Image (spheres, rainbow, N blue to C red):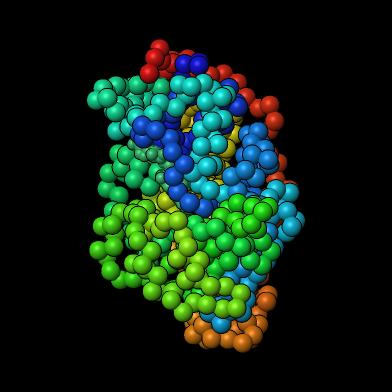
């Protein structure tokens, strides 16, 4: 492996997409990942068409995505009476040039990890290596403090450090020492997966209930040809004012009985929610958390990306997508400015403001805000949704959200590739190359 020019803290989806991007444009990099072993953790996530486009441009194929997920065909909100509040086609069916995928988060991370190892080398991701801080150097570079699982510590110099170390980012904590603690949105989610028959189109994202009490579910695998069953990802959610829930941490395994009662009578002739949850293989409790936006993601030669930059509520299903887009925008700007703080400053100008606004918008329930409107206007009870929110208003609401999140169809279809095929960073500065890490 060539000597690293850019160090990346965190080997999640954002960090690995960044490593693949840097390799593609000819920039040597090194990922430090705190876990000792990569495991396919997590459950379902959505990859919006703008992120799928970037994955294709990284040489990740449709066949590979089909192994870890399923192209989404529909996005629907359904009221407690079982009637549709809103539905629309998604991905290619809707006219996007790229599909939207619902995938298993852990399997996507493992796919990206395999690609990094194949393309860059076995040492490209250093496992058991926690980034604890950084020091800006007088020559404009950065020295990165790394604590290894065997107890060793090192200060590793580089031209740039990219903090992709997630919602509890150590890089962000140093960059913004006065940031407020994690912000809790007053609701609890329980996530799990169940083998079940997919409903509606067979690849539908369904949000059912009210803005205070709902279940979201969608398949993350193609159906088994013999049984017709697909792996269905579900997220059951209720609002709560019990702040002690925050102490439970992020992704705490819990018995299904602890929350099943919230959905005990949620049965229709087309859906049995208690059965769906009860047949789950496991459940994780997950408070709805994010962080207040910060005014900048950049400190000279150091930048944040992914959840380290913009942890957001999953209501818009675009946390992972935005992490991938961040990586690609960084790569594009390095093609223009080299591996320099100027590239990071341009990235900050391009994304920090709009994506911080998106974080706040997701607090207002993101696209689920339609359910708030239903609740405000008719207490959630309606026969014909057109009498409550006219079709034009519903469509405008969704179009507005997609524009803010960067996947408005016409804009995306017309946009040139973020990184032109064959683009490379012209001159990689040599002053910060290091001998070994
Ligand atoms: C274990 C796990 C499971 C998840 N499951 C889901 C899910 O089911 N559904 C969902 O919507 N979202 C889930 N997420 C969040 C989702 O992956 C992110 O919102 C999104 O993909 C953006 O990814 P990211 O790479 O910015 O952050 P993350 O995916 O959080 O990745 C950050 C990476 O950095 C590593 N890291 C943390 N601190 C340091 C440090 N100091 N030094 C070095 N490495 C460090 C972490 O181990 C992790 O691998 C999960 C995240 C994690 C870590």
Q: Residue at x 68, y 33 (%)?
A: 420
> Residue 178 location, x and y as percent?
27, 48
Q: Let me know if residue 193 appears in the view.
A: yes
Please tell me how many numbered marks the rendered image carries.
0
| Location of residue 131 by image quarter | top left
Q: Nearer the viewer, residue 39 or 212?
A: 39
Q: Nearer the viewer, residue 312 or 123?
A: 123
Residue furthest top in the image: 435
Residue 190 position in % (x across, y down):
41, 62
Q: Is residue 345 visible?
A: no
> Could you say where residue 68 lies in the image, as x and y percent from the top left?
59, 44
Asked if residue 257 lies left or right of residue 347, the reply is left
Q: Is residue 202 left or right of residue 361?
A: right
Name the residue: 36% across, 35% down.
Answer: 35
Which quadrant of the view contains residue 203?
Answer: bottom right
User: 255 left or right of 340?
Assistant: left
Q: Is residue 41 above or below residue 379?
A: above
Which residue lies at the image location 56% right of the left edge and 24% below the top edge? 118
* Horizontal side, residue 46 vs residue 409: left or right: left
Q: Does residue 427 sit above or below 72 in this rendering?
A: above
Quadrant containing the C terminus is: top left
Q: Quadrant of residue 64?
A: top right
Q: Looking at the image, which is closer to me, 151 or 313?
A: 151
Q: Find ligand 1 in the image and state its quadrant.
A: top left
Figure check: 411 above or below 266: above
Residue 63 image point, x, y percent:
68, 40
């Amino acid at each position: 492996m060539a000597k690293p020019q850019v160090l990346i803290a965190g080997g999640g989806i954002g960090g690995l997409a960044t490593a693949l991007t840097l390799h593609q444009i000819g920039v040597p990099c090194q990922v430090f990942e705190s876990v000792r072993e990569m495991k396919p953790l997590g459950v379902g996530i959505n990859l919006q068409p703008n992120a799928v486009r970037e994955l294709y441009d990284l040489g990740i194929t449709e066949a590979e995505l089909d192994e870890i997920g399923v192209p989404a065909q529909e996005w629907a909100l359904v009221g407690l009476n079982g009637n549709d509040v809103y539905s629309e086609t998604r991905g290619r069916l809707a006219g996007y040039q790229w599909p939207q995928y619902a995938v298993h988060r852990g399997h996507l991370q493992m796919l990206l990890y395999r690609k990094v190892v194949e393309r860059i080398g076995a040492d490209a991701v250093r496992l058991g290596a926690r980034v604890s801080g950084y020091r800006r150097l007088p020559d404009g570079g950065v020295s990165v403090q790394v604590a290894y699982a065997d107890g060793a510590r090192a200060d590793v110099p580089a031209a740039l450090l990219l903090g992709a170390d997630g919602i509890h980012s150590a890089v962000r904590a140093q960059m913004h020492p006065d940031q407020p603690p994690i912000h809790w949105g007053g609701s609890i989610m329980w996530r799990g997966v169940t083998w079940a028959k997919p409903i509606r189109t067979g690849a539908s994202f369904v949000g059912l209930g009210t803005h205070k009490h709902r279940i979201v579910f969608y398949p993350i695998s193609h159906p088994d040809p013999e049984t017709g069953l697909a792996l269905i990802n579900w997220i059951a959610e209720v609002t709560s004012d019990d702040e002690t829930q925050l102490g439970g941490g992020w992704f705490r395994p819990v018995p299904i009985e602890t929350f099943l009662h919230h959905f005990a009578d949620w049965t229709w002739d087309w859906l049995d929610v208690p059965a769906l949850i009860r047949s789950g293989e496991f459940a994780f409790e997950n408070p709805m958390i994010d962080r207040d936006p910060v005014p900048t993601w950049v400190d000279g030669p150091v930048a944040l990306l992914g959840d380290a930059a913009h942890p957001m509520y999953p209501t818009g299903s675009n946390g992972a997508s935005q992490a991938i887009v961040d990586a690609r925008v960084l790569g594009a700007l390095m093609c223009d400015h080299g591996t320099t703080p100027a590239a990071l400053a341009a990235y900050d100008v391009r994304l920090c403001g709009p994506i911080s606004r998106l974080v706040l918008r997701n607090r207002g329930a993101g696209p689920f805000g339609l359910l708030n409107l239903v609740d405000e206007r008719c207490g959630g009870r309606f026969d014909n949704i057109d009498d409550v929110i006219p079709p034009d208003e519903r469509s405008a609401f969704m179009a507005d959200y997609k524009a803010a999140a960067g996947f408005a169809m016409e804009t995306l279809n017309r946009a040139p590739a973020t990184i032109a095929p064959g683009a490379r960073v012209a001159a990689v500065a040599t002053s910060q190359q290091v001998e070994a890490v």
